């Protein structure tokens, strides 16, 4: 699998030309790295939080990329001197060490000797070196970090309550759809795929397309053919996130969500063979159950 994104275009290009043309440096703990960009901007101080994105490469093949895993960038806090002393002989991670050297926008490639790892990650069985690209995207002191966290919690609360407030509306809509479906009143509104999945596309969406191997976040309301609701994310107020096309959900979901773009809305009529099969999923899903899901694609990465 090969993944690329803008922030590492420079790093990948420089590596292709040959990292030997850049000065290879060594961190205090012995990790080799090259600094592709090294600006004069603010560097992190002990106690600061550094937000970053990273990708793990075997040559030019990327096996992990934080940008592909979700909207929130990972971060690390730079330990204070007291905290470092408290860890005794703890060896800092290579990312922790290079983040101390970086300003926002700086990019680095760290060379990690595979033989120093306890286990070889998938895709690196025959590799000698793992290339770990890192780009710093933000630096916050403790006060800025606390303010940002509080703002994020408030935004999540508002979003959660807004989703929960929609439950009666969604329930009524799904009930009406099922009634019309069972009564044969939906006619040409329903489309059918080659696999037997039936669906109504209420709104295709206008954002990013849901793509295989990428994370998607979906709000959903699931009911049986008799109208009984068995699960829904609106009630919890939090979208369900999974990796599309990897069998992490029932086949009808993998196929149906792939029809949408961000903001898209659909009703999926999933036959048992694309759901939980002849056995069902007792005690919630009975045998040979057709499932009806109203879904909204909230986020596609």
Image (spheres, grey):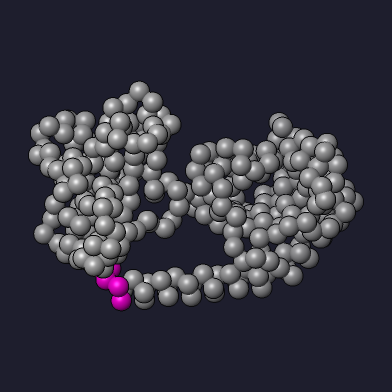
Q: On the picture, is 11 further left or further right than 200?
A: left
Q: Residue at x 27, y 31 (%)?
A: 129
Q: Nearer the viewer, residue 119 or 73?
A: 119
Q: Nearer the viewer, residue 63 or 111?
A: 111
Where is 88 relative to 7, above or below? below
Residue 214 pos. (x, y %): 49, 43
State which quarter of the image contains the N terminus.
Answer: top left
Q: On the picture, is 178 further left or further right than 53?
A: right
Residue 145 pos. (x, y %): 34, 71
- Snapshot quadrant of residue 263: bottom right
Residue 173 pos. (x, y %): 76, 62
Where is 150 relative to 239, above or below? below
Q: Is residue 76 magenta?
A: no
- Snapshot quadrant of residue 87: bottom left
Q: Residue furthest right?
A: 183
Magenta stretch in the rendered image: 138-143
Q: Residue at x 21, y 65 (%)?
A: 81
> In this orientation, does residue 105 appear?
no
Q: Residue at x 56, y 42 (%)?
A: 244
> In this orientation, does residue 275 appear?
yes
Q: Residue at x 13, y 55 (%)?
A: 39
Q: On the picture, is 200 further left or further right than 156?
A: right
Residue 121 pos. (x, y %): 40, 34
């Amino acid at each position: 699998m090969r993944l690329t994104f803008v922030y590492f275009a420079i790093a990948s290009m420089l590596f292709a030309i040959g990292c030997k043309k850049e000065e290879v440096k060594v961190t205090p703990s012995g990790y080799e790295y090259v600094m592709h960009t090294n600006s004069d901007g603010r560097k992190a101080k002990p106690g600061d939080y550094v937000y970053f994105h990273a990708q793990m490469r075997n040559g030019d093949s990327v096996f992990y990329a934080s940008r592909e895993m979700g909207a929130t960038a990972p971060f690390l806090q730079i330990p204070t001197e007291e905290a470092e002393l408290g860890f005794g002989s703890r060896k800092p991670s290579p990312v922790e060490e290079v983040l101390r050297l970086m300003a926002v926008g700086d990019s680095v490639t760290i060379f990690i000797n595979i033989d120093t790892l306890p286990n070889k990650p998938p895709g690196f069985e025959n590799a000698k070196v793992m290339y770990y690209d890192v780009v710093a995207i933000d630096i916050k002191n403790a006060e800025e970090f606390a303010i940002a966290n509080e703002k994020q919690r408030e935004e999540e609360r508002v979003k959660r309550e807004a989703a929960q407030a929609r439950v009666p509306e969604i329930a009524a809509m799904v009930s009406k759809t099922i009634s019309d479906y069972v009564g044969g009143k939906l006619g040409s509104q329903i489309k059918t795929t080659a696999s037997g999945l039936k669906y109504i596309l209420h709104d295709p969406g206008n954002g990013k397309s849901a793509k295989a191997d990428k994370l998607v976040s979906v709000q959903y309301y699931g009911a049986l053919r008799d109208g009984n609701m068995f699960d829904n994310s609106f009630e919890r107020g939090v979208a369900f996130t999974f990796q599309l096309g990897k069998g992490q959900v029932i086949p009808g979901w993998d196929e149906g969500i792939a029809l949408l773009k961000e903001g898209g809305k659909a009703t999926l009529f999933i036959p048992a063979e694309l759901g939980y099969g002849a056995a069902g999923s007792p005690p919630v899903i009975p045998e040979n159950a057709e499932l009806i899901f109203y879904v909204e694609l909230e986020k596609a990465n």
